[in-house]
Amino acid sequence: MAGNYDVIVVGARCAGASVAMLLARAGQRVLLVDRAGFPSDTISTHLIHAPGVAALTRWGLAEQLAASGCPPIHQYRLNFGPFTIAGAPLPDPSGVAVAYSPRRTVLDKMLLDAAAKAGAEVREKVSVQELIVENGRVTGVRGRETGNGGALIAERAGLVIGADGRHSMVAEAVGSDRYREQPAGNVSYYAYWSDLPTSEWNVYMAPGRAVGMMPTHDGLTTVLVAAQIADMRDFRDDIEGNYLAEMRKLPGFDDWGSKATRVSRFSGTALPGFYRKPYGPGWALVGDAGYERDACTAQGITNAFQHAELLAEAWLSVQSGEQSFDEAMGGYQSTRDEQTLPAFDLACDLATLAPPPPGMATLLEKTAKSPQASREFLSAIAGTMPVNDFFSVENTSRIMAEVAQ
Ligand SMILES: Cc1cc2nc3c(=O)[nH]c(=O)nc-3n(C[C@H](O)[C@H](O)[C@H](O)COP(=O)(O)OP(=O)(O)OC[C@H]3O[C@@H](n4cnc5c(N)ncnc54)[C@H](O)[C@@H]3O)c2cc1C
């Protein structure tokens, strides 16, 4: 065993704090570092679908989230203009059927505290600047405290996990290869609103534009507006004007729009899609560091939880001698990729905000007319039904036949 720790985790949000908690609970000596001080916000809206809530339930944290005052979300509504696909997604296999959209200040702090409670040593306001590499193997990190006069730190471990987001310093330092790269399909900006009550995840799609709304803490509603990537420069030239112009087009805006108040500044970005090889000698990646996709299907946090579990399981099987490092981590990568690829492709398609091709438009229109098909489509988005099962020839033929007109 190298160093003072079994594992060092760089990045302490939904991927990093989760994997640190799971490993610490299994008896590993874990150091968890982040350059942020918590509670801390980040650029992200924050819908967690039922499979993500199921992970929190397995970890004993779902009740704490519910008790934090975050409203439960049971219904999704995707408005395509001429038709709307609405309903409650199917539950995940463990029976969890609820989604939440917690502020990251609340969610990430809750996960960080759970990691600390499990025994992980947490160091906030520490920026990792480089990896320690010996004989071709990562053996630790060097960094600097962002307060306290910038004291230097150097720590060693058997495994360094990069949970440091899509611009991962760990991934860059080890030169991890990217694959299935997709350019950003849109640019999106969001803000928080008061007096704009909603209990659902509402998405309004129009050619080249989309608006998403979801209820969050403190009685607020998150409203995100996305514009196709070709319009990024124009959109950014007047974010407020363009954002409000899209809101004004929404059904009933004249009723609710005059009462609602924006209570935050705008935040946003454009997200490309890619996978990174998530392991090598002495290192691993989890969360956005290893797998990034557009936010339109709201899968990032749920995926971060799922992949934290997969990575923890893989590392523990190495520690117990059950599998070699390459076997276990190769399994982690292939399971991660197999489980996410169809959803990744769907997210990349939807992210372009292009009108669906005619065959797809017909399928979606018919889906909207069938409560069961609507539930299934929404479940494919939520991750409680495999995307390929919804779009299988058998299933789509059934929907087309069932809904005659
Ligand atoms: C506009 C937008 C909307 C989104 N909406 C949703 C949504 O509704 N639902 C959903 O599930 N997902 C959504 N996502 C995606 C979601 O935010 C990410 O998938 C998720 O945050 C990934 O978590 P993570 O822990 O992997 O990385 P991050 O949340 O990016 O956390 C990485 C952490 O690493 C730390 N770090 C980085 N480098 C270093 C370093 N060198 N030293 C120390 N610390 C470091 C950072 O400070 C940060 O705290 C959205 C994203 C965006 C941009």
Image (spheres, helix red, strand yellow):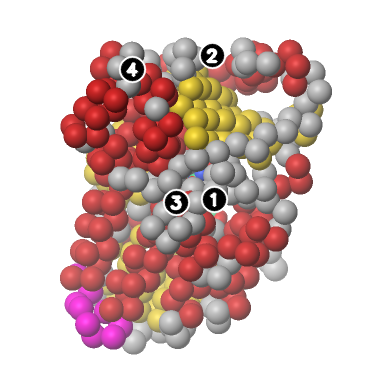
Which numbered disc flags the more N-terminal residue, 1 or 3? 3
Which numbered disc flags the more N-terminal residue, 3 or 2? 3
Q: Residue at x 28, y 78 (%)?
A: 317
Find the distance from the CA under tag 1 to the CA under tag 3. Answer: 8 Å
Badge 3 density bin: few <14, some 14–19, many ≥20, Cα 10 Å = some
The percent coordinates of residue 92 (x first, y second) are 42, 54
50 on left or right of 322: right
Q: Is residue 143 visible?
A: no
Which numbered disc flags the more N-terminal residue, 1 or 4? 1
Badge 1 density bin: few <14, some 14–19, many ≥20, Cα 10 Å = many
**Which mark lies nearer to you, 1 or 2?**
1
**Which mark lies nearer to you, 3 or 2?**
3
The percent coordinates of residue 376 (x first, y second) are 37, 38
Disc 2 residue type (three-letter): Asp
Q: Which residue is mark 2?
A: 234
Along the viewing direction, whichever of 139 and 66 lies nearer the viewer: 66
Give the vertical position of 124 relative to 356 (above or below). below
Along the viewing direction, whichever of 4 and 358 lies nearer the viewer: 358
Pointers 3 and 2 in contact (CB under 8 A)?
no
Q: Which residue is mark 4?
A: 361
The percent coordinates of residue 113 (x first, y second) are 63, 70
Pointers 1 and 2 in contact (CB under 8 A)?
no
Residue 323 among magenta residues: yes
Q: Residue at x 34, y 45 (%)?
A: 385
